[in-house]
Image: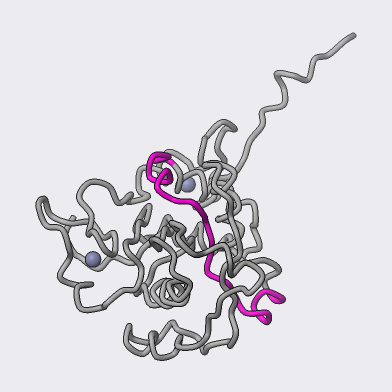
Amino acid sequence: MFISFENMVTKEHSCISCSKEILDGSEFQLCENCLKNLDSIDGETCSKCGDRLKDGILRCEYCEGFGYEFDSNRSVCYYTDVSSKIVKGLKYGGRKYYAKHIARLMTKDKKFFEKFDLITYVPVGKKRLRSRGFNQAEEIANEISKLVNIPAVSLLSKTIENKNQAKLSQKERLENLKGTFDIDTSNKDKIKGKKILIVDDVFTTGATLSECAKVLKSQKPKTVCSITFAKTRFNSIN
Ligand SMILES: [Zn+2]
Ligand SMILES: [Zn+2]
């Protein structure tokens, strides 16, 4: 007797946040519940840091004094239970393929990318690269590059391994980061006059992205903006 297996095998995957089994076909590999609770940052956002704002305000009070070196940042969602599990799965769980799903979430608005010539990413130090096996920001940048047809290029290098930033304030982070990034000399000539987008996984205080933008600006690009998957919420406005 001939048995067709076609209907017996249901392709199933796990949600990249809560691990619940979901049917194949979910664009972002997120279950309905996690997708609903992702806390996307839409609507009016701060023209600098990308935090959600009340109607009519252009710049949030919180980031005004920070003096960010990047022109503007955009983040897809807040760093909540849902997004933090995705980021941790990629970063510490070795689930490199999450980068593809994160990139899909980050490129929902394809029009946003039209204003950029080059995509780059926040580099990690050699030691961290060895222990993790890959740079999560680079993986996400490469996936974004494929989805929006903009080249992803290594423009920065990490010269010094700075101490862990987790317990530091915004000011201390900036101090801690000084001199830790440099231009990737192999691509130095690609920066001048270009509109550059830096990719990272999480925007916490913005100190890392600001420092990266500062280093890039030494080579006279036209603009330097950043995009991250998740962002720590500055404003308590919902
Ligand atoms: Zn889920
Ligand atoms: Zn802001």
Residue 167 highlighted magenta (yes or no): no
Determine the residue positioned at 42% across, 58% down.
227
Q: Dividing the image into 4 quarters, which one contains the N terminus? A: top right
**In the depicted structure, whether residue 31 falls above or below residue 203:** above
Residue 182 visible, this orientation: yes
Determine the residue positioned at 58% across, 60% down.
90
Residue 225 visible, this orientation: no
Q: Dividing the image into 4 quarters, which one contains the C terminus? A: bottom left
Q: Looking at this view, name the residue that lies furthest to the left.
A: 56
Closer to the camera in the image, 110 or 26: 110
Residue 115 location in percent, x, y? 40, 47
Residue 54 location in percent, x, y? 12, 54
| Lateral position of residue 231 relative to residue 144, left or right | left
Residue 156 location in percent, x, y? 56, 72
| Lateral position of residue 97 relative to residue 144, left or right | right
| Lateral position of residue 117 relative to residue 175, left or right | right
Residue 125 highlighted magenta (yes or no): yes
Span shown in magenta: 108-131
Closer to the camera in the image, 230 or 177: 177
Q: Looking at this view, name the residue that lies furthest to the right.
A: 1
Determine the residue positioned at 45% across, 62% down.
84
**In the depicted structure, whether residue 219 falls above or below residue 18:** below
Closer to the camera in the image, 204 or 151: 151
Q: Looking at this view, name the residue that lies furthest to the top.
A: 1
Q: Which color mode does the image show?
A: one colour
Determine the residue positioned at 54% across, 61% down.
120
Q: In which quarter of the image is residue 114?
A: top left
Count of residue discs:
0
Q: Quadrant of ligand 2?
A: bottom left
